[in-house]
Image (cartoon, rainbow, N blue to C red):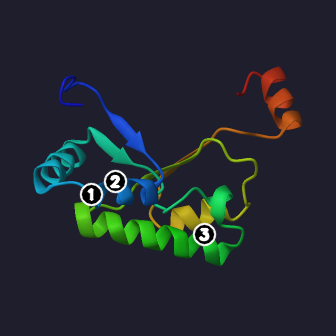
Amino acid sequence: MKLKPHTKFTYVQIEYFRMWWDEQDEDTKTQMRQWVKEGRWEFLNGGMSANDEACPSYQDIIVNMMAGRDFLMKEFGIAPKNGWLVDSYGHSAGNARIYADMGIEALFVARIDRMDKEKRYEEKSL
């Protein structure tokens, strides 16, 4: 990011970031905070992990999101506004509602049901 100032990076798994963060010096943390402030580094979702990996219930989703978002608020003063579940093998019907209640304004979901995908392809509504 230092070598290419026009680039933007997005990140989802807050727990992995936090483990890296805890090992960084203050100069690196200051640089990361600046990139976040400039919008060059964006955190999506805000949960410690992606829901399909570790959160089988609504309560688990909420606790997971709260833990990650607490970290982001403490370290960066932000709460993510965008979400993505790019490689999930299933999505809870309530996930979008929970995300919306937490301030997520847009959610990208990559996998959809095969029949839904075929229908959308035929209708040219992908």
Q: Residue at image x 46%, y 73%?
A: 66
Q: Rounded to the nearest whole Å, what is the CA distance between mark 1 and mark 2? A: 6 Å
Report if the CB atoms under discs 1 and 2 are less than 8 Å apart. Answer: yes
Image quadrant in which the N terminus is located: top left
Lower position in the chain sequence, tag 1 or tag 3: 1
Q: Amino acid at mark 1?
A: Glu
Q: Rounded to the nearest whole Å, what is the CA distance between mark 2 and mark 3? A: 23 Å
Where residue 73 appears, x then y in whole percent?
29, 67
Image quadrant in which the C terminus is located: top right
Q: Which residue is mark 1?
A: 23
- View extreme (front): residue: 23
Lower position in the chain sequence, tag 2 or tag 3: 2
Where residue 48 appears, x then y in whole percent?
48, 63
Q: Quadrant of residue 76?
A: bottom left
Q: Residue at image x 34%, y 45%?
A: 42
- Dot 3, how many residues are within 10 Å of its Cα: few (below 14), some (14-19), or many (20+)? many
111 horizontally vs 101: left or right? right
Q: Which residue is mark 2?
A: 20
Q: Quadrant of residue 57?
A: bottom right
Q: Considering the numbered disc 2 on the image, is that residue within a helix, a strand or a loop?
A: helix
Residue 61, disc: 3
Q: Nearer the viewer, mark 2 or mark 3?
A: 2
88 horizontally vs 18: left or right? right
56 horizontally vs 119: left or right? left
Q: Residue at image x 80%, y 31%?
A: 117
- View extreme (left): residue: 27
Q: Rounded to the nearest whole Å, what is the CA distance between mark 1 and mark 3? A: 27 Å
Q: Amino acid at mark 3?
A: Ile
- Dot 2, how many residues are within 10 Å of its Cα: few (below 14), some (14-19), or many (20+)? few
Vertical comparison of 62 with 10: above or below: below
Q: Residue at image x 19%, y 48%?
A: 37
